[in-house]
Image (tube, rainbow, N blue to C red):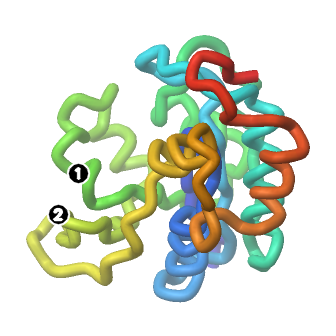
Amino acid sequence: MNEVIAVYGGSFDPPHVAHTLVAAYVLSAHPVDRLLVVPTAQHPFEKRLTAFEHRVHMCELAMSDLRRVDISTVEQELEGPSLTLHMLRELARRHPAAQLRLVIGSDLLAETPGWHAFDEVRALAPPIIVGRSGHAYDEDGEPLPELPDVSSTEVRRRLRAGISTDGLLNPKVAAYVREHGLYREPSVRP
């Protein structure tokens, strides 16, 4: 049987506990052999992101307690804005014997008609839908387990305001953020 690789992409700016819980959930509840966490290199809608290297390292720290999780820098090697289809095509080229599965939050289901060639994305890597707060239903309307409602936007707001992120960030990620002075000013994103 071919290896099944779940592909979990996102900005991860910063990676928080809900990201880690998604990875643990997918590995525990779905027949996958491993999970690739794929930080976005260049946001397709030109959203300003913290430096790719920082986000990759924070993902490594956030996922360090989970076996069968690898952090992929494939997005950095692709040209232009990050598009899910381009990333999946490259991963399929690198892992020709593997079955890819795309991890997607249920809150994004309504947006998929606007994605670049989502039908091809779905064919290349059939989605694993993960329940998000307020959107805990799959494509067929079936209920899904809801994961905690944590957002990177809220974590960044708390960090800028000097408010505790206890329970929202892996302590190793929080230490890295402090050590590198990340998320201090809204207009300065190293």
* Above or below 46: residue 123: below
Kind of residue at badge 2: Glu
Residue 57 spot, x, y in % from top left? 83, 47
Q: Quadrant of the C terminus?
A: top right
Residue 13 picture quarter: top right
Q: Horizontal placement of 21 versus 33: left or right?
A: left
Q: Residue at x 40, y 73 (%)?
A: 148
Q: Which label is found at residue 75?
A: none
Residue at the extreme bottom? 28
Label 1 belongs to which residue? 109
Query: How far apart are the two marked residues, 2 and 1, measured between alpha carbons?
Result: 7 Å
Residue 67 spot, x, y in % from top left? 78, 79
* Above or below 99: residue 48: above
The secondary element bearing badge 2 is classed as loop
Q: Residue at x 83, y 63 (%)?
A: 172
* Above or below 60: residue 88: above
Label 2 belongs to which residue? 139
Residue 6 spot, x, y in % from top left? 56, 63
Q: Quadrant of the N terminus?
A: bottom right
Residue 83 spot, x, y in % from top left? 48, 27
On the question of residue 189 being in view, the answer is yes
Label 2–label 1 contact, CB within 8 A:
yes
Residue at the extreme front? 162
Is 188 in front, or is 17?
188
Kind of residue at badge 1: Leu
